[in-house]
Amino acid sequence: MSELKPIETERLILRPYEDSDAARVLDIQGRLEVIRWLGNPPYIPMETLDEALAMIGRWRARHDVDSQQRAYAIEVKDASQVAGTALVMRLDRLEGGFVGEYEVGWHLHPGSFGHGFATEAVSALLDVAFAEGLDQIYAGMFPDNEPSAAVARRLGLREIGVQEDPWYGGDGRLFHTTREEWTAR
């Protein structure tokens, strides 16, 4: 089991979530405008600190099982506040289970939108993930999630297009990159 080490950028610290972050996780995950983009319906906002603590625990457990999986709190240095989450998670195909595919994702508190935090955080996260052995990564989103598509483009991820999503079902807008493409950018 490897330890999830913090990653520092010019404006941000990406660090493992701590139990003391539960109130902020609840604030973020309790907002329909955030969770509406994070998975398939029904969208049920988080309601309790216990739910937030359970989510933090699941994020930790995933890394314990598979060191390629990682979920970071995005902390803004000059605000000392968690702006959101940047993560790498394994993808299980609807037909066929896990075949070595991972996705990168991000979500922010609405008060942190529009500052470039997602792009800065995910860029640093991908630098580390690829340096530590990840071969390729996908980013999937709802076809109408223009803000996330813009982040993926700023990151330089190659747009595959809108197609049947093999991991979540339904139509998804998919992006992809490999370690070679990422390091050559």
Image (spheres, rainbow, N blue to C red):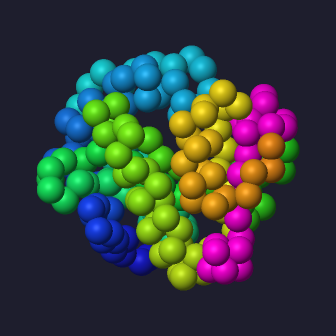
Closer to the camera, 106 or 169? 106
Seen in the picture, residue 30 relative to 85 is either above or below; the reply is above
- Residue drawn at point x = 29 percent, y = 45 percent: 83
Q: Give the range drawn in magenta.
A: 162-185
Q: Is residue 128 magenta?
A: no
Query: Residue 118 in the image: x percent, y percent?
Result: 43, 51
Decide if residue 128 is on the left or right side of residue 166. left
Q: How many labels does the image show?
A: 0
The reply to whether residue 179 is in sight is no
The quarter in which the N terminus is drawn is: bottom left
The quarter in which the C terminus is drawn is: bottom right
Closer to the camera, 13 or 95? 13
- Residue drawn at point x = 44 percent, y = 68 percent: 124
Closer to the camera, 15 or 173? 173
The reply to whether residue 117 is in sight is yes
Splitting the image into 4 quarters, where does residue 78 fall?
Answer: bottom left
Splitting the image into 4 quarters, where does residue 47 fall?
Answer: top left
